[in-house]
Image (cartoon, rainbow, N blue to C red):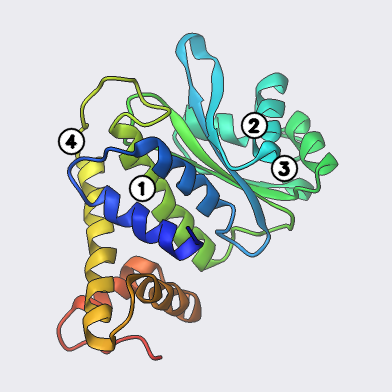
Amino acid sequence: MNTQEKWVHLLRAVSQPEVSDSDVLLRHAVELGADVAPEAVSCSITEIAEGDSYRTPVYSDQLALDLDRAQYESGDGPCMAAAREHRRQYFDAALHGQRFPGFAEAAAERGVLSSISLPLNSVDRSAALNLYATSRYAFDAERPQAVSDLLARCVSALLARGGAAGRPGEGPVQDDRLQAAQARARLIADAESALMTSRSLSRADALTMLIQRSRAESRSIFQIARDVIRPGTSEPAP
């Protein structure tokens, strides 16, 4: 399954009331996270477990797991801060190394110069989505922020339904944040359907068109999707 197919699978799934393959979708999500920005290389999910310990239930590769563990072992890091404080955490090796020295050292040894950790707010345990990159400021631009936000909302929805980091056996959590995540996913799906009908595109090509326009216009993918489905609004140029 290629990148666009994974996005289609993920967005379609979180717009549905129930998901039967949350663990597979979470693995797809972290694989997509490793491609959010040109220099992004790895992605993981951090969860605060019982006893205030931290764990990484899903990760894209060994690099992501090693960087998460370096933070757990040093006692602090952006992924832990995002899960604990419920605020996104940007890390730049040159600017924030003194705050997270243990992580900064581990990241430098592996060629990672920046990261972003986003709190996952629709789960009953504190968690964060972590993205790592080999350049500075990799997640500062509008498109990486918009795509990482979309990915975090999708992951939140999956975890709320009892995925790999959720509590086994629990049913769906229908709170306002989960419903908001589902609404955003439906917005993307509706825009894809509109483009598929008007331009005879595949769903994967329709998503690609939305992402390309988001990048070209420096606007979020949700704003682009609203333009597409709003009557009288022009469609993305070919």
Distance from Cα at disc 4 to Cα at disc 2 = 30 Å
Residue at 48% over, 54% down: 148
Residue at 49% over, 75% down: 215
Query: Which of the 4 quarters of the picture holds residue 11?
Result: bottom left
Name the residue that disc number 3 marks: 96
| Residue 4 in sight in this render | yes
Q: Amino acid at mark 3?
A: His
Q: Nearer the viewer, mark 3 or mark 1?
A: 1
Name the residue that disc number 1 marks: 154
- Check contact, mark 2 vs mark 3: CB within 8 A: no
Compared with residue 144, is residue 58 higher up or lower down, i.e. above or below? above
Q: Position of residue 206 (x, y in %)?
A: 35, 75
Residue at 36% over, 40% down: 156
Name the residue that disc number 2 marks: 68
The circle on residue 174 is: 4
Q: Nearer the viewer, mark 4 or mark 3?
A: 4
Residue at 37% over, 26% down: 166
Q: Residues within 10 Å of mark 2 (few under 14, many from 20)?
A: many
Q: Earlier in the sequence, mark 1 or mark 4?
A: 1
Q: Residues within 10 Å of mark 4 (few under 14, many from 20)?
A: some
